[in-house]
Image: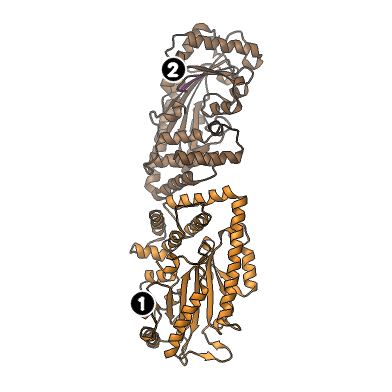
Chain colours: A orange, B brown
Amino acid sequence: MPKWLKGIGPESDIVISSRIRMARNIESIPFPHYLNEEKSQNIIDKVYTTISSGNLSLKNDFSLIKMKESDVVDRLNYVEKHLISPALARNTLGGAVLINKEETISIMINEEDHIRIQCLLPGLQLDKCLDIGDKIDDLLEENIKYTFDEQLGYLTSCPTNVGTGIRASVMVHLPALSLIGYINGVFHIASKIGLAVRGIYGEGTQYLGNIYQISNQVTLGASEEELVNNLQNVTLQIIQNERTARENLLKTKSIELEDKVFRSYGTLKQARLLSSNEAMQLISDVKLGVNLELIKEVSTEKLNELIAIIQPGYLQKYFKSELTGIERDIKRAQLVRESL
Amino acid sequence: MPKWLKGIGPESDIVISSRIRMARNIESIPFPHYLNEEKSQNIIDKVYTTISSGNLSLKNDFSLIKMKESDVVDRLNYVEKHLISPALARNTLGGAVLINKEETISIMINEEDHIRIQCLLPGLQLDKCLDIGDKIDDLLEENIKYTFDEQLGYLTSCPTNVGTGIRASVMVHLPALSLIGYINGVFHIASKIGLAVRGIYGEGTQYLGNIYQISNQVTLGASEEELVNNLQNVTLQIIQNERTARENLLKTKSIELEDKVFRSYGTLKQARLLSSNEAMQLISDVKLGVNLELIKEVSTEKLNELIAIIQPGYLQKYFKSELTGIERDIKRAQLVRESL
């Protein structure tokens, strides 16, 4: 279980995790989708050597995983743990990733860009993520010459990443704002100030379990710090709104709220068939109940763990076999019951 | 808790209770709705004296309850326990009932007819009910002259009861036939052979919790024994059909069925708000789960008890106060949780 799910950080009752991702490319080498296997391998070697020979305190913590050597279940599991992107999982020719033991840092190689440094921590810790990301970035730069334009900044495969190449995001659980229907207001304000709101598995995925990823859209025209601070401030504002909404719900709809969270708890504990969508919604309800101290026998850590457990990749890795949809629903319900 | 709910009898997995009710009227006295308080009281005295001075082994077990001396919650509670009819509960001028300790026998006085003898036992025990009813009937006849016509039989206030004056009924739990949609077939066949199907609280009430009351429509042109045997045989047939339906469900939809009954169990154990309609449906699901040995930690008796516990009259009697709808839903959920 990665630290960002298992662990607890600042504002953990609402912010599940913080993430910084930096896109970098190597000078004079075409972007990854133009590369053959050999040239892709050269980049992997270069990054791996740089990390493992540099003066990083964590340097011995990293493992190199090549997509072509991982089976489909493992790759799906890395995606679910947010350690690699679906795009990297598909690059079984030259895609690879370096992951540290705690699974807080992943360095994707030959995704859309040559290098994508990612740092992921539990709770609201964008500054710390940025700090770790910068350290890795500096180390790589000792040995690798990035494509960099004085005017534009870092050049990237997709123009939306040009500039700082940075994407900062927070994964927030907003059940009360969702319940009272104010979540669209949050989306509206976020989009006005250059932030995007996505589901737990990125663009195009549903808003499962009232969990939302909020990230900067703009990478150009502001410093790394400014971009990160902007997201940090908006997140603090959203946290405040969610807390107020929770308090109001408790004041005005106390028994209905209690009923809802306990019913979901009962279903999680007893169901024999659970789809991942339904499970996410039930976990969301129970998380709210735990945060409001209505449900006392379950921890937030346990519930974050459940979010990972119910994913198809995790289930198949756990049960060591590829499973059909109905088999997954049965095994998912079984694992959730055992876990609770 | 009356014995018919608490106890277990033959075929208890499907038949909750059996009931025989005999309608009798006293010669030369107008039917109850024409009587004033004094004349109604005369009838109460006559019946009470006859029962308590006769040679019935149970004669000291009976209590006399007058409707005018009972509050609305108590009367509602008697109706829910099937010891009196809603019509008797409304006759606060001259209505009364004699009930034995076990609550298996009730003798309603000044309902639609002067006297209605009722015997109610757990499981399929129509013969035994008839036997007990006949004993009470014989005893009353020693002291009371019934209106009786050589051609027609016992005369009653409503012509549909003329003849034997007998109504036999069984309360059956048919979740599998309901689930697979064959229940309308059962209704159709029943009506063809002179049987009526009603909800748990009689005519016009909904089919709550897949519980059905099946009773003879006809009281004329056949002997008591024939009427009772007819119902007995049809009930045995329905039991067989329900068992087959349960087996088929277990064979073909095992996991879906298991999921359904356990979800209902989880909701019963955790909900903070429960309407009586929803509670009945959930109890029905759990009963099925218990009968099929999917759920092992709950007994059929406990579930029959729950059916009584969740009724508005019982709740208000238990909590010793008149409760609003939402208060009942809260207290109902609380009692069910404590009970499970």
First to last magenta residue range = B102-106
* Marks 1 and 2 share the same chain: no
Q: Position of residue A174 (x, y in %)?
A: 56, 62
Work out whether B78 lies above or below A277. above
* Residue B147 at least partly seen: no
Q: Residue lying furthest left in this view?
A: A320
Q: Position of residue B147 (x, y in %)?
A: 56, 10
Relative side of A61 to A277, left or right: left
> Which residue is disc 1 drawn over?
A61
Mark 2, residues whose alpha carbon is within 10 Å: few (<14), some, or many (≥20)?
some
Q: Position of residue A53 (x, y in %)?
A: 36, 86
- The residue shown at (43%, 59%) is A302
Q: Which element carries disc 1, helix, strand or loop?
A: helix
Work out whether B118 lies above or below B318. above
Foreground residue among B80 and A104: A104
- The residue shown at (35%, 72%) is A71
* Residue B156 at least partly seen: yes
Foreground residue among A217 and B163: A217
> Which residue is disc 2 drawn over?
B132
Q: Quadrant of the C terminus of chain B?
A: top left
Residue B104 lies in the magenta-colored region:
yes
Chain bearing tag 2 is B
Work out whether A212 lies above or below A38. above
Q: Amino acid at mark 2?
A: Ile
The image quarter in which residue A59 lies? bottom left
Q: Nearer the viewer, mark 1 or mark 2?
A: 1
Q: Amino acid at mark 1?
A: Asp
